[in-house]
Amino acid sequence: MYKIISFYEFNTFDSSKIKDNQKKLSTECKKYNIKGTIILAEEGINGTISGSVKNIDNINNFLIDIGYSTNTKTSFSDKTPFKRLKVKIQPEIVTFLELGKFASNTGEFIEPKEWDNFINNDDVQLVDVRNFYETVIGKFPSSLDPNTETFTDFKNFVDKELINFKNKKIAMYCTGGIRCETASSYMKDIGFENVFPLKGGIINYLNTVKKSKGSWKGECFVFDDRVSLDYESKVGKFELCHGCRNPIDSEDKKSIYFELGVSCPNCINIRSDIQNEKSRQRQAQINFTKNHKENNL
């Protein structure tokens, strides 16, 4: 059983300490066979990592020892969702305005157990802060979908469309909470007064609220090999198309447009013949390697 933790913290660290922390974390994570991604910046830390329960607890304690007090969400899996370790330094812990140090004026957080009652109020506009490929497999009903391709597009959605709801209460949600902290800070800085993010995001909600009582419909897209999660962080039914990296289910795989490792109904008219051929060659290499290993067991 693997323990998976997703975490982030907005704080302020000077560049010399960030480089030192990168080296320390890389060393400790390798020592404990930890896989996943950790992003460090002057504005804080963001990461999702996996390992044995004991080793993840050791790394969590190490994060505290070197000065991080992280907002952690926990789940478990019978296989590791990551193939390698990355500890990176970037300008922002989540790319939004490419300015860093921006999430300093966040909205008022709503606890998962209070969320459904809050969003059912008539004076509340519910907003999904995620990208289109995330929203298509699961969402809170009646939420406003920004239909963005990347999080950086959300600013344009706020400036051009959400600004029309400026005087309403805005309830907003994302996967783990970090995008909502960043976006709500921007919104408050430009004049939104009533902004209410879901504390800990969808993952926290699914781990806190029982499925029989929850309003969430579908599954939650996650950025690792599990692809999607259901209530209680149970691994969902979706996989990734290796052509376009969009989530696909069993019905998509029955389509005439699905080709393993190459394409799916979402990208059949988007990818070029050259791209598809490169994907076929890659899939052929994967199949060869897999068959070679099986034949030599």
Image (cartoon, rainbow, N blue to C red):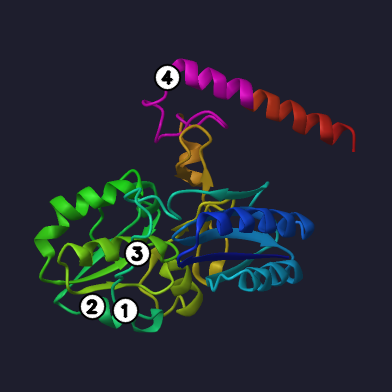
Closer to the chain start, of discs 4 and 1, is 1
**Main secondary structure along the magenta-highlighted residues:** loop
Question: In the rendered picture of this protein, how many numbered marks are placed on residues?
Answer: 4
Of residue 294 and residue 116, the one placed in the foreground of this image is: 116
Label 4 sits on residue? 272
CA gap between label 4 and label 3 equals: 40 Å
Circle 1/circle 2 CB separation < 8 Å:
yes
Q: Work out which residue is located at the far top of the displayed protein and give it.
A: 274
Q: Mark 4–mark 3 contact, CB under 8 Å?
A: no
Q: Which residues are magenta?
A: 257-282
Q: Is residue 113 above or below residue 254?
A: below
Question: Residue 28 occupies which quadrant of the picture?
Answer: bottom right
Residue at point 29% right, 78% down? 108
- Look at label 4 and name its amino acid: Ser
User: For the N terminus, which image quadrant?
Assistant: bottom right
User: Of residues 143 and 73, which is closer to you in this image?
Assistant: 73
Q: Amino acid under label 2?
A: Asn
The numbered mark, 3 or 2, whose residue comes first in the sequence reads 3
Query: Identity of the amino acid at label 1?
Result: Asp
Q: Which residue is mark 2?
A: 120
Q: Which mark is residue 116?
A: 1
Q: In front: mark 1 or mark 3? A: 3
Closer mark to the observer between disc 3 and disc 2: 3
Rounded to the nearest angstrom, the CA distance separating label 1 from label 2 is: 6 Å
The first of marks 2 and 4 along the sequence is 2
Q: Residue at x 9, y 60 (%)?
A: 164
Q: CA distance from mark 4 to mark 1?
A: 44 Å
